[in-house]
Amino acid sequence: RDAIPQTLIDLFKEVGAYYVPALLANAKALMDGADTVETEIDGARWVQKPFAYQGKCLQWLREQHAGLADADRKVVDDVLAGTGCEKLFA
């Protein structure tokens, strides 16, 4: 396992800052049966209708993460730590 390039870490930080909050809020809205998704992204209010497909995407990510061998999951968790993406698996 080679060192992770800073450019990839920076990309994870962008995903963690802008996509993860929407994905998690969408999942909560789906679980709550809400008509809208509401969250804050980069200091701005974000509102949209829930998307079932995004809920499935989060489920698939979590299933794949859980299915990793312990050592591999630790590597992934260490790479994602501090990027905001770790919230997907909290």
Image (cartoon, rainbow, N blue to C red):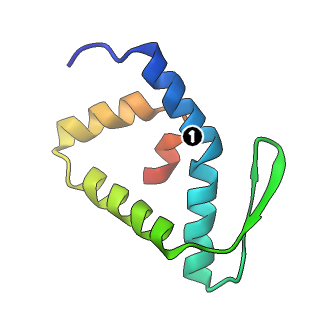
Residue of label 1: 16
Q: Position of residue 58 (x, y in %)?
A: 43, 61
Name the residue at 47% across, 17% down.
7
| Quarter location, residue 15 | top right
| Residue 38 image offset from top left, x and y in percent | 75, 66
Which residue is more in the foreground, 63 or 48? 48
Up the image or down, 53 lies above or below 58; here it is below
Farthest residue to the right: give it. Answer: 44
| Residue 90 appears in the picture as rendered | no
**Is 6 situated left or right of 72 in this image?**
right
Instruction: Describe residue 50's horizontal placement relative to residue 72 as left or right.
Output: right
Q: Find residue 63 and report its horizontal and vertical position in percent.
A: 29, 61
Q: Amino acid at mark 1?
A: Gly
Quadrant position of the N terminus in the picture: top left
Question: How many labels, in total?
Answer: 1
3 w.r.t. 90: above or below: above
Front position in the image: 53 or 81: 53
Q: Residue at horizontal 72%, vertical 76%?
A: 36
Residue 48 seen in this snapshot: yes
Pick the front one: 28 or 70:
28
Q: Is residue 37 left or right of residue 58?
A: right
Identify which residue is drawn at 51% across, 29% down.
Answer: 11
Report the residue that reaches farthest toward the bottom: 33
Can you give x and y, in whole percent of width and height, for residue 48 in the image?
72, 68
Q: Secondary structure at mark 1?
A: helix
Residue 56 falls in image quadrant: bottom left
Q: Residues within 10 Å of mark 1 (few under 14, many from 20)?
A: many
The residue furthest left is 69
- Which image quadrant is residue 42 in? top right
